[in-house]
Image (tube, grey):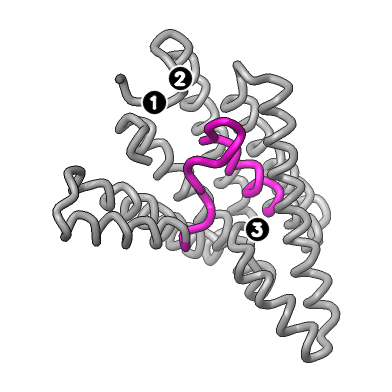
Amino acid sequence: MQSYRPPMIALAVCLAALAGFVDALAFSSLGGFFASFMSGNTTRLGVSFATGRMDEVRMAGALILSFVSGVMIATVIGRRWPKRQQAAVMIAVTALLGLAAAIMQIRPDTRALLLLAAAMGAENGLFTREGEVSIGLTYMTGSLVKMGQRLAGALMGDADRWTWARYLMLWLGFVCGVVMGARCYGAYDNGALWLATGGAAVLTIVVAAMAGRAEREGPWGARAA
């Protein structure tokens, strides 16, 4: 994250908050499964398999496959439209969330929530360098590990003493999103999916504007040399 300008870090925090919001909706709707936390779903899959709860095995497996499919969608988009990658990926994220919200309103079915996992997988295609994810927007374990490493480095006298704070902000953004998602689900039930869609649409506009600026100033989000 240290290679990105502050506005990009702020954008990443907002996108992490969106991921937390969606994860809270999925967790609340699916009885403890996740849209973005695939380690949790993998644990659920293993424990359910060991105890013979095959319905839960199928749900966890489907969510994991949906998440991977979303990552694949973002990767294909990035290769097909490299100059418009960020905006195109966010359009895909918004479309997946909107489709899930529409299906749940017309004919509620928990299988529609698999689209949430696909959207979260795709969201990780926003910040990439040379085809690899440079900022993980939906998995906070990596952010906490990096925060701990940078904090230890700061205590040991590294020159860049505040890099750890960026990872902390990313984690806090996710937590805030989870809190908002849980509250909105309690107030609006599955209607809260439309709020996630609206938030993603707003972020799509922001991403498109920032990507257009990056075309004039240099690589997406990179600090000036």
The answer to which quarter of the image holds residue 185 is bottom right
Mark toward the viewer: 3 or 2: 2
Q: Are marks 2 and 1 in contact (CB under 8 Å)?
A: yes
In this orientation, which residue lies closer to the viewer: 173 or 220? 220
Residue matched to label 1: 222
In this orientation, which residue lies closer to the viewer: 194 or 64? 64
The residue at 42%/56% (across/down) is 143
Q: Is residue 97 left or right of residue 128?
A: right
Q: Which residues are magenta?
A: 117-141
Q: Position of residue 212 (x, y in %)?
A: 48, 14
Is label 3 in a helix, a strand or a loop? helix
Is label 2 in a helix, a strand or a loop? loop
Is label 1 in a helix, a strand or a loop? loop
Q: CA distance from mark 2 to mark 1?
A: 6 Å
* Mark sitting earlier along the chain (3/1): 3
User: What is the number of the mark on residue 219?
Assistant: 2
Q: Is residue 138 above or below residue 201?
A: below
Q: Are marks 3 and 2 in contact (CB under 8 Å)?
A: no
Asked if residue 85 lies in the magenta stretch, the reply is no
Q: From the image, which quarter does the N terminus lie in?
A: top left
Q: Is residue 146 left or right of residue 36?
A: left
Residue matched to label 3: 190
Q: Position of residue 115 (x, y in %)?
A: 74, 50
* Mark sitting earlier along the chain (3/2): 3
Amino acid type at image mark 1: Ala
User: What is the number of the mark on residue 185?
Assistant: none
Amino acid type at image mark 3: Asn
